[in-house]
Image: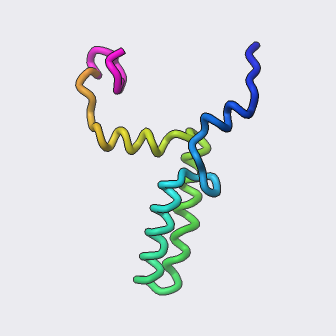
Amino acid sequence: MSSYSPVFLGLLREPQFFGVDYHYAVLSLTVSVLAFLNLSSWGILLFFPLHVLGWLLCRVDPHIFPLMRCRARLGRIKNIRFWGVQSYEPS
């Protein structure tokens, strides 16, 4: 049975702001502020569903947003037939 300290888990987790990744928090806040400016006071209500969506995704996998950024930047990997999965390194 392996036991490991919660300190190591905290060191390996992505930095978060209210339970979501920092980049996602800035993006959702920016979208909410722009909607607030364009749609008057109803635009601020957009923040809560966006934040809950990000929070649920981060609960599933704390590294989901960096993985999505990597996937968007690199696209489909050429060695998928060899490995059978999306491998970003040859080893």
| Picture residue at 45% right of the left edge, 42% below the top | 66
- Nearer the observer, 78 or 90: 90
Apparent side of residue 81 relative to residue 41 in the rendered image (left or right): left
Residue 90 in the image: state x and y as whole percent: 32, 18
Q: Please, is residue 80 above or below residue 68 in the view?
A: above
Q: Please, is residue 42 above or below residue 65 in the view?
A: below
Secondary structure mostly seen in magenta is loop
- Most extreme residue toward the bottom is 40
Q: Please, is residue 17 above or below residue 29 in the view?
A: above
Residue 6 in the image: state x and y as whole percent: 74, 33
Q: Is residue 83 magenta?
A: yes
- Nearer the observer, 56 or 28: 28
Res. 35 image quadrant? bottom left
Q: Which residues are magenta?
A: 80-91
Quadrant that contains the N terminus: top right
- Nearer the observer, 8 or 56: 8
Q: Is residue 71 magenta?
A: no
| Picture residue at 47% right of the left edge, 86% below the top | 40
Apparent side of residue 27 relative to residue 51 in the rendered image (left or right): left
| Picture residue at 36% right of the left edge, 15% below the top | 91
- Most extreme residue toward the left is 78
Apparent side of residue 30 relative to residue 44 in the rendered image (left or right): left
Apparent side of residue 61 relative to residue 81 in the rendered image (left or right): right
| Picture residue at 47% right of the left edge, 75% below the top | 33
Residue 26 in the image: state x and y as whole percent: 49, 62
Res. 72 image quadrant? top left
Tell me how the rendering is colored.
rainbow
Res. 59 image quadrant? top right
- Nearer the observer, 78 or 15: 15
